[in-house]
Image (cartoon, rainbow, N blue to C red):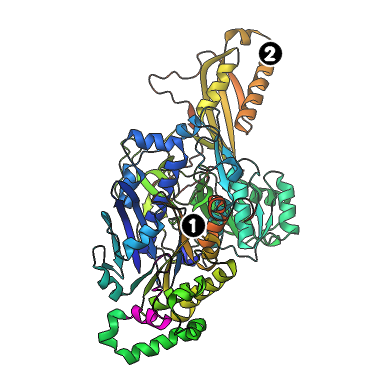
Amino acid sequence: MLRVKNIHVYYGMIHALRAVSIHVKEKEIVALLGGNGSGKTTLLSAISGVVRPAAGEIAFNGREITRERVDRLVRAGIIHVPEGRQIFGPLTVEDNLLLGAYHRFSLAGKGAIRAEVDEIFQLFPVLGERRRQLGGTLSGGEQQMLAIGRALLSRPKVLLLDEPSMGLAPRVVREIFEHISRLRKELGMTILLVEQNARAALAIADRGYVLETGRVVLQGSSEELLANRDVQRAYLGRGRNGPR
Amino acid sequence: MYWEPDKECMDREELELLQLERLQATLNRVYAHVPFYRKRFDSMGLSPEDVTSLADLSRLPFTTKEDLRDNYPYGLFAVPMREVVRVHASSGTTGAPTVVGYTRNDIKTWSNLVARILVAGGVTKDDVVQIAFGYGLFTGAFGLHYGAERLGASVIPTSSGNTARQIKVMMDFKTTALVSTPSYALLIGDTLREMGIPVSALSLRYGLFGAEPWSDAMRQEIEGKLGIVATDNYGLSEIIGPGVSGECLERHGLHISEDHFLVELVDADTLQPVSPGEAGELVITSLTREAFPMIRYRTRDLACMLAGDCACGRTGRRMSRVLGRSDDMLIIKGVNVFPSQIESILFEIEGTEPHYQIVIDRKGAMDEATVLVEAAESIFFDQMRRQREMVERIEKRLAQELGISVQVKLVEKKTLERFEGKAKRVVDNRKLWASPHGGETASDRSSPA
């Protein structure tokens, strides 16, 4: 459903993505792996329209969206959950969630959206418990759930998740990834996931791509990537893991 | 029956998408990790990102057997040796063999690809598979072995040779599928007859044959003598070994595993693509190899593509059996032999003249190679003993170098035909290759008995 073909992105003189091609099928979880500066976030941003590719094309359900305006992409269901959560600290949990439906206020009506917020609270009970609390006072894991919950209120067809495990304790990471896995299972969500934590990502992903200095150097099923020694060394911790 | 139905029956559009992504990743990897490719791309002003479609493949340089030899043994490996879990080799034109490596993932991929051709040829996990390929540096035996294990079949690694024992194992262990060269299958059939064992005493149902050219006439003979359904498969060690393509039970062309290999057909002289339906040299690019990726490898095998869909439901394009070679390589008893290998040995040996001829016959099922060598006059004036010693020395050296036994006959000076221009050193009486549209003869030339 989502297809990126040969895209190039420049930041000034820096050639951040070089002829990158990837695809994500409906209800798939696809992981983008790679080190710092490999272009993972840039690729997500190019898909969500935050940065503009210099060349190449991006298609969504067969329609070219390479130069589509960001708000149109949101309406089309391409929702980007940025790195670092970007929660509004001074706003309550509930208000943060409501902002996810901002573009639908006039259409859907407040009542309907309230009902959707309640659904999010069912999905993430901890957010329900803290609905009146300020976003800034939540723990890292709760903020990540809030960021995902807010994205869900945008009625995503494809969820672009950037480093959901960042800065979280291993136990919390596990919980977040369980939630992500459920989004696919229960809501039929299609997910493109950027992660440094390759093990956690590949545990829930169907397939993955490995980026290095703006190029895709590996692609394959999660199983294949986990068995790849480059992936093991670079992203899973040298020597300790994987079959020897 | 399929092994990986989602891959083998993939929608064409989806397949091409996957091929492009895999091609681009492969190019990025070889450019980063194999100096040979980086230098060659750089010298042509090419960068991996210039390849933005499958059609752009034709802009990339070819890789040849000579390139492999120049980078002997590990120069074309794309991963450090600590990631290589297996090494295979096949013979080269002038002695240096071609060395290929596999990572753990490569072995897994290879096993799955071979499982595909086994399943396509009728084999299931309930079969007892006897592998009568020679186990060793060549890829045939291990390729089929791992593939059959992956499938879950019971593998009997008898290796090649000792036909009477093969038959005893086949009867006692109730072998249901035989893997060997076609000529060895025929020999087994003939030996059965000599031993007075009826086909009904065997449990054999299927045979998967490769490693050398064979014909549909030979197929019928094998099927009759062994009471089996025989299929052909193709591969070469430079690409992965067996598992590049194989026949399904329709037996009308060999399905290529196109999600792992891009196959082009080019005119061996102009190197331009041939017209659809025409025969050309197979040029193969690997899409998933980790340890030993190959970009546009010139196989020297000639084949053509078959048009239309196959009734079996697989969407992988079908190639004909191999129709011949675009170089002078011979396949004798399943082993690749280049006349240049024989020539260089003859040059080493004192008392021979640089005139020789290689004669290959097929006696019954098996190949017989004879090298006729002109000997210096002094040898013929001498006693028989010296002649015999010389013959034995040459035979021994040839056996060492080629890995197969070859008969040597000394002939008097100036008895062999002289040639102006290109010498015709080889007389092949086997009639192996057939016409492009007869669908005859094929080889998995990397996997001999």
The picture quadrant where one finds residue A172 is bottom right
Q: Depth check: B214 or A122 in front?
A: A122
Q: Earlier in the sequence, mark 2 or mark 1?
A: 1
Quarter occupied by the C terminus of chain B: top right
Label 1: element kind: strand
Q: Depth check: B154 or A6 in front?
A: A6
Main SS, magenta region, reads loop
Question: Which residue is label 1 attached to?
Answer: B247
Left-right relation of B165 to A125: right
Residue B225 shows which numbered tag? none
Mark 1 surroundings: few (<14), some (14-19) or many (≥20) residues within 10 A: many
Does residue B309 appear anywhere in the picture? Answer: no
Question: Which residue is label 2 attached to?
Answer: B386
Task: Tell me where the magenta segment starts and ends, as one range.
Answer: A82-101
Q: How many marks?
A: 2
Which dot, 2 or 1, sits closer to the camera? 1
The residue lying at 53 percent from left, 22 percent from top is B343
State yes or no: discs 2 and 1 in contact (Cβ < 8 Å).
Answer: no
Same chain for the residues at labels 2 and 1, yes or no? yes
Q: Position of residue B399 (x, y in %)?
A: 64, 29
Magenta region includes residue B405: no
Left-right relation of A74 to B6: left
Q: Position of residue B424 (x, y in %)?
A: 44, 26
The residue lying at 49 percent from left, 57 percent from top is B247
Q: Position of residue B155 (x, y in %)?
A: 68, 57
The picture quadrant where one finds residue B281 is top left
